[in-house]
């Protein structure tokens, strides 16, 4: 086959995938149904394989489809399903605009040793129980962090700007949204990696994809034996070099009529560039028939409730009549462990499977999940954690569990989440304004969904918080609501292993039945 339609189909599919994945990170209003995201995220190789190792079910076997697709078609995953690969194509095309006559590509010898060393080190580190390298270099995770930390703030800024303009005309169809509060240090790695990928793709096409990316190298090993391949017909080839000039993977040695299949990403640029019909895409000669594959594209049927209203909850809390302290608190919060999101099971499990793609950071409606710096250690940098100074985990929300593609956050029903204790609450009496300023507060108790924080008599008419950790789930609503600064009077310390919480007693409201109408 040498039809130009192949390239057009590839471009259309890539555009659809790129838009859907980008929206999955920037759609802070959750307008797009989750099922569309889940279908595309199902085929992201690294998250899928980590989820399958953790939870071997059909719904987490998207990597098997990718392996089969690569064995049949070559590295089409890199051109159609990988968001960072598609981004490289966009940057590469932009770079090509600076060349008037020809694109700047040419055949380049592969950095075979470097590629395989990076792949080997990444696999060794993974086998040793750490996902640090794969999360750092995984193309999906790189794209996810870039979209969450760099692109989403721009989208929110535009949203808030439009909201401000509409509010001027007394229209509130669009409301302002809070930014994700991310430590400045966390921006460094995404900016550096995106800058590196952008520069290489702008100047050298798929150099990152074919040199640094361990997934690209791994799929390249399989594509060497793929059934469908780019082939050069010696009889028709005039050695004009147009195929090499248009090959963004720099894998066509037109002088020797050779295509490096380990680097070819089946973009089909060479097919449309060749004027002599010397290049085609089809089955290898040794094949006896069609390669058949019917992968089970079982969709992950995550069903979610309407969570748009959750975005208002932080502002509702702020609007309550909470006393403003006149003194700064003095006793630091003695945290012994970070709090990882619900479904993480334990810090060890969570950090083992999390690729730091930041999809949960982007999806969290309460903005309580932020990337870590050193809370999980150097190997866990950028992996998400809960920051209850910036938000709280909504008692009725399991959004992060639903979107996690790698199995770092295991499936967790809402009722089970309500009985999962991700951390324990601690009370620092010396920081509480009831103690320091002899004034009423009670913000922590008012916002506790399980009533693990109760107000009990203290001095005179004052009441002070009392904690029941048996029914506390560690949601952080109390910590977020506490008005003391810079240290909270009540805070949640993470559980290294998530524990079960007792179900809070439900006090039924007794309604007195009237025998007859009083009038």
Image (spheres, rainbow, N blue to C red):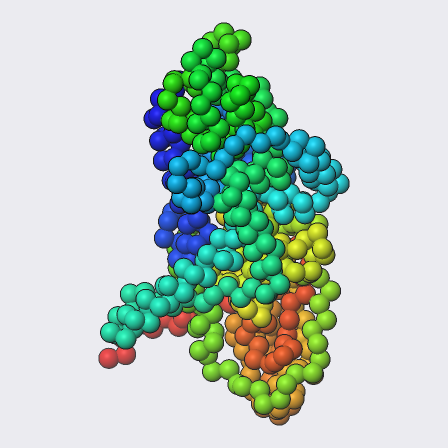
Q: Nearer the viewer, residue 298 or 137?
A: 137
**Residue 462 image offset from top left, x and y in percent:** 60, 88
Q: Is residue 190 left or right of residue 164?
A: right
Name the quarter where the N terminus is drawn: top left
Q: Residue at x 59, y 24 (%)?
A: 222
Residue 64 seen anywhere in this rendered image of the structure: no
Q: Residue at x 53, y 37 (%)?
A: 206
Q: Residue at x 65, y 89 (%)?
A: 436
77 lies above or below 38: above
Name the quarter where the C terminus is drawn: bottom left
**Residue 107 image offset from top left, x and y in percent:** 54, 30
Q: Residue at x 64, y 67 (%)?
A: 492
Q: Residue furthest right?
A: 128
Q: Is residue 84 left or right of residue 97?
A: right
Q: Nearer the viewer, residue 182 or 428?
A: 182
Q: Nearer the viewer, residue 408 or 475?
A: 408
137 lies above or below 461: above
**Residue 58 image offset from top left, x and y in percent:** 53, 32
**Residue 405 image offset from top left, x and y in percent:** 54, 43
Q: Residue furthest top?
A: 288
Residue 325 seen anywhere in this rendered image of the structure: yes
78 lies above or below 441: above
Instruction: Count how many numbered circles sit on residues in the image.
Output: 0
Determine which quarter of the picture holds residue 57: top right
194 lies above or below 171: above
Q: Is residue 454 left or right of residue 319?
A: right
């Amino acid at each position: 086959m040498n039809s130009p339609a192949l390239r057009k189909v590839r471009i259309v599919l890539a555009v659809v995938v790129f838009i859907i994945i980008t929206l999955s990170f920037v759609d802070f209003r959750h307008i797009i149904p989750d099922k569309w995201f889940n279908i595309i995220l199902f085929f992201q190789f690294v998250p899928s394989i980590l989820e399958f190792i953790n939870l071997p079910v059909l719904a987490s076997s998207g990597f098997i489809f990718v392996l089969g697709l690569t064995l049949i078609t070559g590295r089409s995953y890199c051109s159609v399903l990988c968001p960072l690969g598609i981004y490289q194509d966009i940057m590469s095309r932009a770079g090509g605009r600076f060349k008037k006559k020809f694109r700047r590509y040419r055949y380049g010898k592969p950095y075979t040793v470097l590629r395989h060393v990076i792949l080997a080190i990444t696999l060794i580190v993974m086998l040793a129980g750490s996902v640090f390298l794969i999360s750092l270099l995984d193309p999906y995770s790189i794209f996810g962090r870039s979209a969450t930390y760099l692109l989403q703030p721009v989208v929110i800024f535009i949203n808030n700007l439009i909201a401000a303009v509409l509010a001027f005309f007394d229209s509130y169809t669009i409301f302002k949204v809070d930014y994700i509060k991310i430590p400045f240090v966390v921006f460094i790695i995404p900016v550096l990696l995106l800058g590196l990928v952008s520069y290489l793709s702008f100047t050298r096409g798929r150099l990152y994809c074919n040199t640094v990316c361990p997934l690209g190298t791994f799929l390249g090993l399989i594509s060497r034996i793929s059934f469908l391949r780019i082939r050069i017909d010696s009889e028709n080839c005039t050695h004009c070099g147009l195929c090499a000039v248009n090959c963004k993977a720099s894998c066509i040695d037109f002088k020797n009529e050779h295509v490096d299949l380990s680097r070819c990403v089946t973009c089909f640029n060479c097919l449309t560039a060749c004027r002599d019909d010397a290049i085609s895409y089809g089955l290898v000669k040794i094949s006896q028939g069609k390669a058949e594959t019917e992968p089970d594209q079982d969709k992950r049927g995550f069903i979610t409730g309407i969570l748009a209203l959750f975005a208002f909850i932080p502002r509702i809390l702020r609007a309550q009549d909470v006393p403003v302290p006149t003194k700064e608190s003095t006793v630091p919060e003695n945290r012994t462990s970070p709090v990882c999101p619900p479904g993480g099971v334990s810090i060890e499990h969570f950090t083992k499977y999390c690729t730091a793609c930041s999809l949960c950071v982007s999806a969290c409606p309460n903005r309580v999940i932020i990337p870590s710096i050193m809370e999980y250690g150097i190997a866990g940098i950028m992996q998400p954690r809960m920051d209850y100074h910036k938000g709280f985990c909504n008692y009725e929300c399991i959004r992060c569990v639903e979107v996690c593609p790698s199995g770092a956050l295991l499936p967790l029903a809402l009722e089970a989440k309500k009985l999962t204790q991700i951390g324990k609450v601690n009370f620092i009496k010396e920081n509480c304004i009831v103690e320091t300023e002899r004034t009423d507060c009670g913000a922590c108790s008012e916002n506790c969904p399980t009533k693990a924080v109760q107000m009990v008599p203290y001095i005179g008419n004052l009441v002070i918080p009392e904690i029941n950790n048996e029914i506390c789930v560690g949601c952080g609503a109390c910590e977020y609501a506490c008005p003391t600064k810079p240290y909270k009077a009540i805070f949640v310390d993470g559980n290294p292993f998530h524990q079960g919480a007792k179900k809070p007693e439900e006090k039924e409201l007794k309604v007195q039945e009237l025998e007859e109408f009083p009038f």
